[in-house]
Image (cartoon, grey):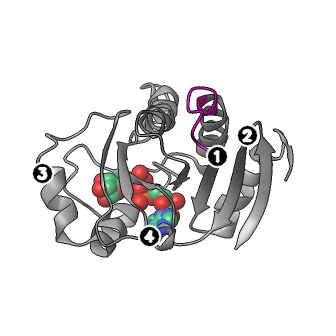
Amino acid sequence: MTVLTRRIGGAELEVIVADITTLSVDAIVNAANTSLLGGGGVDGAIHRAAGPELVAECRMLNGCKTGDAKITRGYRLKAAHVIHTVGPVWNGGTLGEDDLLASCYRRSMALCAKHELISVAFPAISTGIYRFPAERAADIAVRTTIEGLALAPTVARVVFCCFSEPSAKLHAETLAQHGGPC
Ligand code: AR6
């Protein structure tokens, strides 16, 4: 279900409610952990849908630091690639959680630029098992991704793929303050 679509420069940004594993985009972003070897939430869903080849490739990456991102192929997913990023665990906001979450979106957009990807879909990183407050996370997600567009000229479509309508509403509220209608 599409909640909002906005045009910013040459790119179309969408907020939808969907299962990210079903999307046909160049890359879906995974809210992973530092091991990159799978887990619960969206991470578990992506690994289940991609098949065992995904964890085999992940094993060769030597993990990922919080705030960083690494790219693999998508295997059995419709998405050609998976960008694995590690969001911060929320600890009250005094341990640099905002900057680390922004870094996830920035580093993911940088990988899109490096690999000349055209379309990318993000889940609401850190807002599940890692307990980051949803409204604060949505604001960081949308603002940082918009900033990242300037350095990712190939990206023409960004999807904020939310798992619930309340989450989508929070992303739409921030996105509505930017760009114009499509
Ligand atoms: N499609 C889109 N969004 C989803 C899906 C899905 N299929 N499934 C869940 N979400 P979470 P985190 C939403 O917990 O907070 C894992 O064990 C979910 O509703 O998946 O970054 C990792 O291995 C929420 O809004 O990730 C780490 O250990 C958002 O995705 C840890 O969880 C993120 O929730 C990472 O925790």
Q: Position of residue 70 (x, y in %)?
A: 31, 41
In the orientation shown, which residue stands out farthest toward the right?
A: 181
Q: Residue at x 65, y 60 (%)?
A: 167
Residue type pointed to by label 4: Thr
Q: CA distance from mark 3 to mark 4?
A: 21 Å
Q: Is residue 9 left or right of residue 60?
A: right
Label 4 Cα crowd, 10 Å radius (few <14 / some 14-19 / many 20+): many
Q: Which residue is mark 2?
A: 10
Q: Position of residue 48 (x, y in %)?
A: 28, 74
Range drawn in magenta: 148-155
Q: Which residue is mark 4?
A: 21
* SS for callout 2: loop
Q: Residue at x 40, y 64 (%)?
A: 42
Give the quadrant of the N terminus. bottom right
Please indicate, yes or no, whether residue 169 appears anywhere in the rendered image.
yes
Q: Position of residue 153 (x, y in %)?
A: 60, 33
Q: CA distance from mark 4 to mark 2?
A: 26 Å
Q: Residue at x 85, y 53 (%)?
A: 182
Residue type pointed to by label 1: Ala
- Ligand 1 position by quadrant: bottom left
**First in residue order: circle 3 vs circle 2:** 2
- Asked if the residues shown at circle 2 and circle 1 are in contact, with their CB atoms under 8 angstroms apart, the answer is yes
Q: CA distance from mark 2 to mark 1?
A: 6 Å
**First in residue order: circle 3 vs circle 4:** 4
**First in residue order: circle 4 vs circle 2:** 2
Q: Which residue is mark 1?
A: 156
